[in-house]
Image (spheres, rainbow, N blue to C red):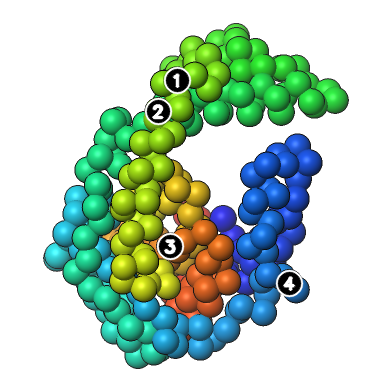
Amino acid sequence: MCRTVADAVDVLDVIVGFDPYDAKATREASKYIPRGGYKRFLKADGLKGKRLGIVRNNPYFGISSGTPVAKAFHSHFKTLRKQGAVLVDHLELANINEIYSTASGEDVAMSAEFKLALNKYLRDLVVSPVRSLADVIAFNNNHKHLEKIDEYGQDLLLAAQVTGGIDATVKSARQNVERLSQGGFEKLMRQNKLDALVTPGYMVSTVLAIGGFPGISVPAGYNKDGVPFGICFAGLRGSEPTLIEIAYGFEQATKIRRPPSFTR
């Protein structure tokens, strides 16, 4: 989370690259890093010529008519067009109900992978009061008030703790997630030759997470209570340069963000 797209790009330039502690994933991802970094994609005219897809009629990140978000987004669609973007409207994302259901396999795969990754990370720390997920759970139970366990619980940690590595069930879940991703978001993007999918808020994050796809959210407005909401631009793997151009172009054309004010 950053103040501006430019700030986010500064952070991205620092954190990308090969990590020997996560060699397989970061070696694969490193091939997408542009020579010279990402800052050169901060272009005020970054929306020009971009094909942007809009999915309206679904309960997860559709744009319900009559709401403050819908009104803001219809205004933003005009801005996107004015800035030279081509809007491909009324698209449908296949498998959307399954993607957002427990049948997708996302929770199964994530729980198993989370336990393995966290245990490895904690074991490698030089100094730490906890060395495993089990230690973390025990610490939380011993400090319930401090960790607000009664208020928030730790269901995700407990679900991860009972997993037993990458077994047949997890492998099947991974395959299903890959199938949903290829037949859903990837197919939508490629068939319609999109540079990005445009959605309100953060609900598209599940679609992006299961496929390892990038997205960037920019302030799009405020509700009646002054709470901000965003517009998300999502793309295929390696599309970060294009997404930065789009997000920065939108940000510079609208300049919606205002510094937060605190009444207490």
Asked whether the beta carbons under mark 1 and mark 3 sit within 8 Å of each other, the answer is no
Q: Which mark is residue 84?
A: none
Q: Earlier in the sequence, mark 3 or mark 4?
A: 4
Q: Nearer the viewer, residue 230 or 204?
A: 204
- Identified by mark 4, the residue type is Arg
Label 1, residues with CA under 10 Å away: few <14, some 14-19, many ≥20: few
Image quadrant assignment for residue 105: top left
State the SS at label 1. Answer: helix
How far apart in space, not on screen, are marks 3 and 4 (Cα)?
22 Å
Q: CA distance from mark 1 to mark 3?
A: 31 Å
Q: Tell me which numbered mark, 1 or 3, is placed earlier along the sequence.
A: 1
Indicate whether 144 appears above or below 185. Answer: above
Q: Is residue 95 left or right of residue 170?
A: left
Instruction: List the residue tagged with mark 3.
Output: 234
Near mark 3 (Cα within 10 A), the count class, few <14, some 14-19 or many ≥20, is many
Residue 137: x, y in percent? 57, 14
**Residue named by callout 1:** 168
Q: Report the front residue among 230 and 40.
A: 40
Check whether the beta carbons of the residues at disc 1 and disc 4 lie within 8 A of each other.
Answer: no
Say which amino acid is labelled 2: Ser
Tell me the CA gap for discs 2 and 3: 26 Å
Residue found farthest to the left = 66
Mark 2 or mark 3: which is in front? 2
How much space separates mark 2 and mark 1, taking CA atoms? 6 Å
Q: Is residue 213 left or right of residue 119?
A: left
**Mark 4 = which residue?**
35
Q: Secondary structure at mark 4?
A: loop
